[in-house]
Amino acid sequence: MKNKKYNYSRRKFIKKAGAATAALPFLNTFGLPKEKINPVAEFNPESDTPNIILILSDDHQYNTLGFMGKFDFLETPNVDRMAKEGAYIQNTFVTTSLCSPSRTSILTGMYTHKHGVVDNDSPVPPQNIFFPEYLQQRGYETAFIGKWHMGNITDEPRKGFDKWISFKGQGVYYNPELNIDGKKVPREGYITDILTEYAVDYLKQEHTKPFCLILSHKAVHAMFEPAERHKGKYKNVKIEHPDTMANTEENYEDKPRWVKEQRYGWHGVDYMYHGELGVSFDDFVRLYCETLLALDDSVGGVMKTLDETGLSKNTVLFYTSDNGFSLGEHGLIDKRQMYEESLRIPLLAYAPELIKPGSKIPELIQNIDFAPTILDIAGIKTPEQMDGKSFLPLLKGENINWRDHIFYEYFWERPFPHTPTVFGIRNDKYKYMTYNGIWDIDELYDIENDPEEKHNLIKKPEHEELYKGLNKKIYDWLEATDGMQIPLRRDIFWRADKRKPKE
């Protein structure tokens, strides 16, 4: 009988989810866990354990959604539906704004300096445990469909997944070669649509166990390529530039020197990706928004399938991104730095039997919280090596004690040397960023009154005690989590300056 055994009432779900089995033994470790996983409690096939779907996009700026209104022309009706009928988690952040470190944090629930994936080329240290491994031992089927991008060496199936569909590295937007359970399969078409097709097929299959599906998209990573049906849709729209984009003395007053210098390089508005896309800044933004549209179609395809199959009654659906993305703010594009557009990500959750429609959750959530939350939904206690915590109670509308600040780290990369090592802390009122390895100015912003981060307060005498206190919190955190060292990785003998415009 297809999927029916997992339907359940809202009351049953709320009672069950978040109440982890007391008998679950977990690793009592610090830093990287041992590779072996202790067994969890035996799965009861007649239980009300829900299915879980995580749709993960790439480089999606948190406010480039239709309902957010950043661009009045942008239409994302399906993600908007998630916000209207589910929950919009308003303040969600990454711990490192870079693809591989962030994706590893999502899977492990750990900070970058603990899981060890500090750049886009390092393979995942084998001691790390991915949350789907715990789900497998709980009795779940697990599937990964899409972009892996944690070490560019191979697209071979990874541990923790019963079903595997992926590709090497960044992949391509059109006509990809996929690895399907170890077999190379060339496909024609657009990658977002192809991955969605596989996901929908997976959802329509008969499942004798609850499942966890990760649908991990390439989009909207540069170099942007919209689906054929969306090409040119926004070619005539007017693009409003951020106030902080202009190259003015006012915009760069008390800004670090590296920020202004970067506007002329790979991640700057005046030499975007060294001209590889061959477009103006306005067309750059138009292409970005057009590429987003197929992502929204993907969300719509998944939600339609959940509705048609009845799976929406016992499935929790998340939509999020691995990083944010700057679109001209402070003269920058892309990510890595800790300005809001790079740091923040969209996060929406949809589960009609669990989440009150139109919920807005203001607490500070990080990507290290995704794994504990998903495990909590499955009735699994958070493993002790994880740094994050479950926000399932918040999804259920409960009032609980929650963190009042988040931490950030990014480690300098030789291929992209224009962004220094960054450590930072943010709360609802202030953000402080300090840079390691360069002789430059730190940054302190009153983001409550200065959300665009225009006015650096670091030189104001009245804020000296504040920023010193925030600095202390950063180093207390690093010291407590074994992070008082700068990790080194082998040279790959490639740098961004080797990339030039196509002739």
Image (cartoon, rainbow, N blue to C red):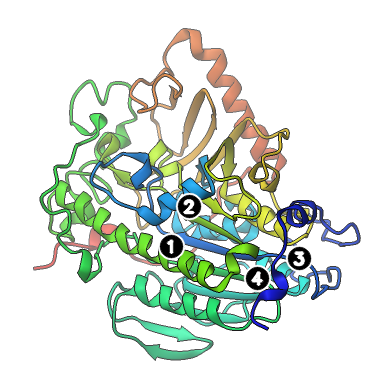
Q: Earlier in the sequence, mark 4 or mark 1?
A: 4
x 55%, y 73%: residue: 309
Cβ atoms at labels 2 and 1 below 8 Å apart: yes
What's the CA distance linking mark 3 and mark 1? Answer: 25 Å
x 34%, y 53%: residue: 76
| Residue type (three-letter) at the residue carrying disc 3 | Asp
Q: Earlier in the sequence, mark 2 or mark 1?
A: 2
Cβ atoms at labels 4 and 1 below 8 Å apart: no
Establish if 99 lies above or below 145. Answer: above
- Residue beneath disc 4: 126
Lateral position of residue 198 relative to residue 363, left or right:
left
Residue 299 disc label = 1
Cβ atoms at labels 4 and 2 below 8 Å apart: no
What's the CA distance linking mark 2 and mark 1? Answer: 9 Å
**Element under label 3?**
loop
What's the CA distance linking mark 2 and mark 3? Answer: 23 Å
Cβ atoms at labels 3 and 1 below 8 Å apart: no
